Image (spheres, rainbow, N blue to C red):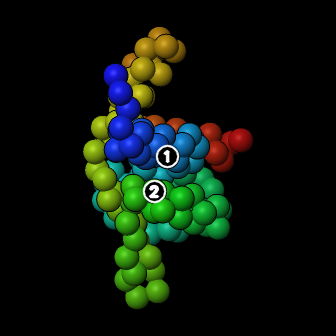
Amino acid sequence: MELTEQTLEHYRLHADVCRVLTDPKRLMLLDALRAGERSVGDLALAIGVALPNASQHLAVLRTAGLIEGRRIGTTVVYRLAEPAIADACDIISAIVARRLGRAVLPAAERATNASIHAIQG
């Protein structure tokens, strides 16, 4: 198979998106955004991190084009820019669950467990 410049660029962009998804906190943020728009403060609380840390991770996700933010007064709320990313995360979650010999957790339960773990850890 001959690789064209367009094909190589496709794989480069694919790798860039995958790199963004290598951080557990970013995965938790994506899970928390499944239900719709949420503020930075709400997201930080949902995943159990400090506001500045949540903002840093949101910036990475936003730069990658996976989320979008909009200002409502002084508050910035975020939403999934690529809702299909949740499906991709579900596929990986199912693989992980099989490897662990467990049932796949619903997104809401994964986010809750992550918050509890963050608080305890």
**As drawn, 1 above or below 68:** above
Q: Position of residue 49 (x, y in %)?
A: 63, 56
In the foreground, 45 or 10 = 10
Q: Position of residue 117 (x, y in %)?
A: 62, 40
Is residue 111 left or right of 94 when viewed as pictured? right
Tell me if mark 2 has few (under 14), some (14-19) or many (20+) residues whose alpha carbon lies within 10 angstroms of its own. some
**As drawn, 71 above or below 113:** below
Q: In the image as oriented, which residue stretches furthest toward the bottom?
A: 73
Query: Which residue is pictured at 42% across the width and 39% down the height?
Result: 8
Query: Which residue is pictured at 48% across the width and 62% down the height?
Result: 63
Q: Is any part of residue 27 visible from this angle? A: no
Q: Position of residue 83 (x, y in %)?
A: 28, 50
Q: Is any part of residue 91 visible from this angle? A: yes
Q: In the image as oriented, which residue stretches furthest toward the right?
A: 121
Query: Which residue is pictured at 44% across the width and 69% down the height?
Result: 39
Q: Which mark is residue 64?
A: 2
In the foreground, 86 or 17 = 17
In the foreground, 55 or 113 = 55
Which residue, given by chain and number where applicable, does mark 1 sit on?
16
Is residue 55 left or right of 38 when viewed as pictured? right
What is the quadrant of the C terminus in the image?
top right
